[in-house]
């Protein structure tokens, strides 16, 4: 089974005149947060909020910048999240995927809006 990659649009809601950045993001259900490489964070011109301690899949630990806010768009869905600045690719973690009510199908290699709620995200409260 390979990786599931999907196209998302990232933007800085505090800088509406700045063009959004369209990227291929790895849908990573094992990651919690949105992660962006430094060059994407610079393109978005998002503010540093703090440094955050992270542990990556191989057990290494690091302190990385936490920036935001970032507006994430996928099809007819949008969310606002902070992002960890790390790595060489955009990782779409569980928080933004849950916020937008997205479904990952590893067998088909796709990300879709939840077919049970096609018009708007549905949440459990």
Image: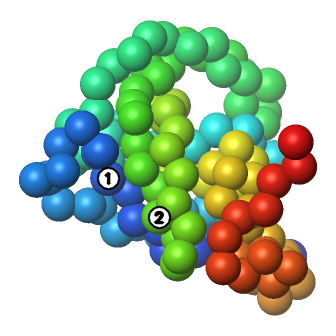
The image's mark for residue 11 is 1
Residue visible at 18% across and 50% down?
16
In x, y percent, where is residue 50?
44, 11
| Residue 54 seen from this side | yes
Q: Is residue 49 above or below residue 15?
A: above
Nearer to me, 89 or 60: 89
Side of 30 where 65 appears, left or right:
left
Q: Quadrant of residue 112?
A: bottom right
Q: CA distance from mark 1 to mark 2?
A: 8 Å
Which mark sits nearer the N-terminus, 1 or 2?
1
| Residue 42 seen from this side | no
Q: Is residue 27 above or below residue 33?
A: below
Element type at marker 1?
strand
Q: Quadrant of residue 114?
A: bottom right
Element type at marker 2?
strand
Residue visible at 42% across and 50% down?
71
Residue visible at 78% across and 76% down?
117
Q: Quick check: marks 1 and 2 in contact, CB under 8 Å?
A: yes
Residue position marked by numbered label 2 in the rendering: 73
């Amino acid at each position: 089974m390979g990786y599931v990659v999907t196209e998302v649009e990232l933007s800085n809601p505090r800088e509406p005149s700045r063009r959004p950045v369209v990227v291929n993001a790895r849908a990573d259900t094992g990651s919690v947060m949105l992660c962006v490489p430094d060059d994407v964070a610079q393109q978005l011109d998002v503010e540093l909020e703090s440094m955050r301690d992270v542990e990556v899949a191989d057990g290494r630990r690091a302190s990385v910048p936490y920036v935001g806010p970032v507006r994430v768009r996928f099809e007819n869905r949008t969310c606002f999240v902070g992002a960890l600045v790390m790595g060489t690719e955009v990782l779409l973690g569980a928080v933004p995927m849950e916020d937008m009510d997205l479904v990952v199908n590893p067998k088909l290699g796709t990300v879709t809006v939840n077919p049970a709620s096609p018009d708007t995200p549905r949440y459990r409260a």
